[in-house]
Amino acid sequence: MFPLPLPSWRYKVRRAKEHLEALDHAVKWFTETGAYKRRHEFQAEPPKYLFVVESVSPVPLQIPLMVGDYVGNLRAALDHMWTAVLDHLDLPVTNRTQFPIFQREPKGKDGLRVWSQQIGGVPGNIETIVKGLQPYKRGKDAVAHPLFYLNELVRRDKHRELSLMVVRSSGPVIDGREMLVRPPLKRLEPGTVLHEIGQAEILASGMTDPNVAVNFYDMPEIGFEKPAAVEGLEVVTTLRLVGLEVAKVLDTLAPFYEPHAPYRDWMKKGDATPGF
């Protein structure tokens, strides 16, 4: 087999970027071509405008499939990179070798055993850096760490049903001006009241006629419903955040899988800084 001109993890990252670009286009097409239908009606008592969902289109299957492809390639990029680290340190690579992602600090016999199996006995200076990249370093906010999102999405996509997406809408506008802040993500179903706008709010916006037609700024989005780790988060934005965190990890550990001899010597010595 011919050697690759670039490290394998770079190809995984490239492929992930291609999936994300395709996903972004697919989401925009879906949201811009009628993800749901709604109606605008006026309620007399008490006086207010209502925006009500009439129907919701199913999210195209290609969208969760592309999500799975994207996160799968990013996770693989981390594992390929970590294998390169062990290779350049002349450490054994096993079927348990992978870049570790831990929500909780590894403790006890079982926790430390799993950590050791994944990290592969690298020098202490490298292990310290890897620990600093872990979700558990955020304490109670570990579940909001992008690497934790990545692990949960990959786990869900590989071993259970595909991550499910829901649709949400942005706020209404009057006379082209956004009137309300965007509402939180919600599962849209027929009959769901998207927004309620009282006449007093319309008057406060500067309109003199309380019966002015209220336009709806139609910008639905796709969000995660499952897994629970990303429930309520917008899909493309969340995946971009995950990608940035993966890039951070790859950049941070780059010196340790650099194939040039000076770096190999430095890594084996366990020095604190490389000798440029």
Image: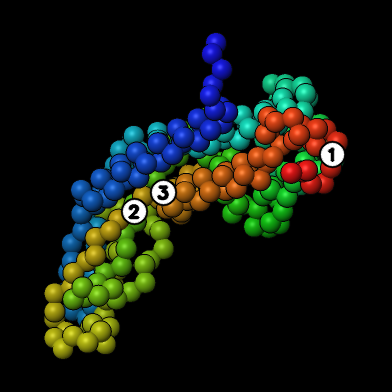
Which of the 4 quarters of the picture holds residue 110? top right
Residue 244 appears in view: yes
Mark 3 to mark 2: distance in Å? 9 Å
Q: Position of residue 121 (x, y in %)?
A: 81, 31
Quarter placement of the C terminus: top right
Q: Do tag 1 and tag 2 residues touch (Cβ < 8 Å)?
A: no
Indicate which disc residue 221 carries: 2
Pointer 2 local density, CA inside 10 Å: few below 14, some 14–19, many at least 20: many
Q: Earlier in the sequence, mark 1 or mark 2?
A: 2
Residue at image position (77%, 23%) is 90
Q: Position of residue 169 (x, y in %)?
A: 31, 59
Q: Earlier in the sequence, mark 3 or mark 1?
A: 3
Which of the 4 quarters of the picture holds residue 130? top right
Q: Secondary structure at mark 2?
A: strand
Indicate which disc residue 195 carries: none
Indicate which disc residue 270 carries: 1
Identity, as a three-letter code, of the amino acid under mark 1: Gly
Nearest the viewer among 181 and 199 is 181
Q: Position of residue 242 (x, y in %)?
A: 53, 47
Pair 3/1: label in front: 1
Indicate which disc residue 236 carries: 3
Q: Earlier in the sequence, mark 3 or mark 2?
A: 2
Residue at image position (21%, 73%) is 176
